[in-house]
Amino acid sequence: MTKRLSRAALRRLVIARAHGCCEYCLSQMNYSSHSFAVEHITPRKRGGQTVENNLALACQGCNEHKHTKVKAPDPLTGKLVPLFHPRRHQWAEHFTWSADDLEILGLTPTGRATVAALQLNRTEVVNLRRILSAFDEHPPAHLLISE
């Protein structure tokens, strides 16, 4: 029998699993001026459940741009493709950093569609990455360890 976690316990689990970073743009909670949300990868409106494997940590910008989207057009081909799914996909398979580590580049149709739909290179996020890079706080440390 599966133990049902409280809302607070689920939030702690999601934050720890994400290392305190947005699972889409990799912004770090510790340096954000806005709160982060535990969001439904498949929105409840589309039948998504409030269970561990359907929850992701998202910064306010990514959460707002994603809203109820699960698909978006690939800017290169125009074809409708699934957005990045943090529980099913590996970030490094769909995205990479630009040479200066300031912008996220999509490597696959899903990566490109997610960059565009969630606006992963919003001006404020790129500016924060620039500042954090100057203090060796970007990219997030957990990415450097696992690569």
Image: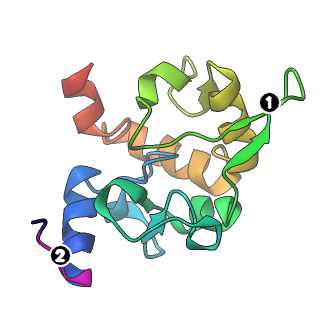
Q: In the figure, residue 16 lies in which quadrant?
A: bottom left
Q: Is residue 143 left or right of residue 96?
A: left
Identify the residue at horizontal 17%, vertical 76% (top origin). Answer: 5
Q: Are marks 2 and 1 in contact (CB under 8 Å)?
A: no
- Return the residue found at the far front: 1
- Name the amino acid type tagged 2: Arg
Asked whether 91 or 129 is in front, the reply is 91
Q: Which stretch appears magenta?
A: 3-7
Q: Residue at x 28, y 57 (%)?
A: 20
Task: Give the number of the disc on residue 4.
Answer: 2
Task: Check residue 49 in the rendering and tell me which mark sits there, or answer none.
Answer: none
Residue 66 sits in quarter:
bottom right
Label 1: which secondary element: loop
Give how far across and how far down residue 24 sits, in percent: 50, 46
On the question of residue 9 being in view, the answer is: yes
Name the quadrant of the C terminus: top left
Placement of 24 over or under 63, stated as above or below? above
Q: Is residue 6 magenta?
A: yes
Q: Nearer the viewer, residue 73 or 101?
A: 73
Q: Is residue 124 above or below residue 140?
A: below
Residue 95 visible in this rendered orientation of the protein: no
Classed neighbour count for the residue bearing mark 2: other residues with Cα under 10 Å, few (<14), some (14–19), many (≥20): few
The numbered mark at residue 74 is 1
Q: Which quarter of the figure is the N terminus placed in?
A: bottom left
Residue in the image at 51% along x and 41% along y: 130
**Circle 2 — which element?**
loop
Q: Which residue sits at x=38%, y=43%?
A: 87
Q: Amino acid at mark 1?
A: Asp
